[in-house]
Amino acid sequence: MIKAYIDVTLKKSILDPQGTAVKKGLEKLGLYAEDVRIGKHIEVVLREDKIEAAREKIDEMCRRLLVNFEVETYSVRFEVIE
């Protein structure tokens, strides 16, 4: 089996009001960051033996449901599990 870790974030060209609010909150606590962006982390376990087959399924899931390509982008990494 293969576990996919999917990170979905807003495109750089899209304003992130939630990230801006968190950055301001951190500054009020005396903690400073150059930039804060908020996204989603999704984990999916697939009954696949090969990463390429898993990648095809994950890409389809992202295209059809998990990612709004108008405003979001995604990255994925895989782990073979027992």
Image (tube, rainbow, N blue to C red):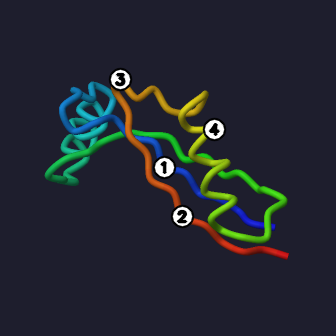
| Disc nearer the start of the sequence (2/3) | 3
Q: How far apart are marks 2 and 4 (CA)?
A: 14 Å
Residue 45 coordinates in the image, percent (x, y): 77, 56
Element at label 2: strand
Q: Which amino acid does label 3 sit on?
A: Glu
Q: How crowded is mark 3: few (under 14 residues within 10 Å), some or many (20 or more)?
A: few
The mark nearer the N terminus, 1 or 4, is 1
Give residue 51's position: percent from left, percent from top.
Answer: 65, 68
Residue at label 4? Answer: 61
> How many C-alpha atoms fall within 10 Å of the one at disc 4: few (<14), some, or many (≥20)?
few
- From the viewer's perspective, is 36 left or right of 46? left
| Mark found first going from the N terminus, 3 or 4 | 4
Tell whether label 1 touches label 2 (CB within 8 Å): no
Which of the numbered marks, if any, corresponds to residue 77? 2
Dot 1 amino acid type: Asp
Task: Say which residue label 1 marks.
Answer: 7
Image quadrant where residue 24 sits: top left
Screen quadrant of the N terminus: bottom right
Mark in the foreground, 3 or 1: 3
Viewer-side residue, 21 vs 45 = 45
